[in-house]
Amino acid sequence: QVQLVESGGGSVQTGGSLRLSCVASGNNVLTNTWSTMGWYRQAPGEQRELVAVVDNKQTANYADSARGRFTISRDNSLTTVNLQMNSLEPEDTAVYYCTYQSYAGVWWGQGTQVTVSS
């Protein structure tokens, strides 16, 4: 199993910044094989969508909506992922979910609310 603990959501005005963090723990958190950690989001009435993910080689992949405004990073222990979100827009309002994926499976956090007001 993998447990994911998220932090850092909140409310900001347009143009503001937030930093999300997620810590993974459990016996399926692997550091010597392929894995990814990252963030997806889901707005009301919408499907869950990719924001950004980073693998164990520190290779990052961003959604077009996030590229240039958001930066994802993963620590050297490969158990913590951060998402620095700048220039936030009302369209970024959603519940943000941390995810961990390896050959053993896919796990999701409980989600953290991000609200951007105009």
Image (cartoon, rainbow, N blue to C red):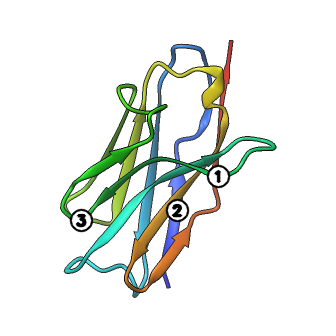
Find out whether the residues at labels 3 and 2 contact each other: C-beta distance under 8 Å: no
Q: CA distance from mark 1 to mark 3?
A: 23 Å
Q: Secondary structure at mark 2?
A: strand
Q: Position of residue 109 (x, y in %)?
A: 58, 63
**Label 3 Cα crowd, 10 Å radius (few <14 / some 14-19 / many 20+):** many
Q: Position of residue 62 (x, y in %)?
A: 38, 42
Quarter location, residue 114: top right
Looking at the image, residue 22 sits to the left or right of residue 95; the answer is left
> Which residue is labeled 1 in the image?
48
Sequence-first tag of 3 and 2: 2
Looking at the image, residue 77 sits to the left or right of residue 109; the answer is left
**Number of marks drawn:** 3
**Label 1 Cα crowd, 10 Å radius (few <14 / some 14-19 / many 20+):** some
Q: CA distance from mark 2 to mark 1?
A: 19 Å
Q: Say which amino acid is labelled 2.
A: Val
> Which residue is labeled 3 in the image?
56
85 to 35, vertically: above or below: above
> Which residue is labeled 2 in the image?
5
Q: Say which amino acid is labelled 3.
A: Asn
Q: Secondary structure at mark 1?
A: loop
Looking at the image, residue 14 sits to the left or right of residue 86; the answer is right
Q: CA distance from mark 3 to mark 2?
A: 19 Å
**Mark 3 vs mark 2: in front:** 3
The extreme front residue here reads 64
The extreme right residue here reads 45
Sequence-first tag of 1 and 3: 1
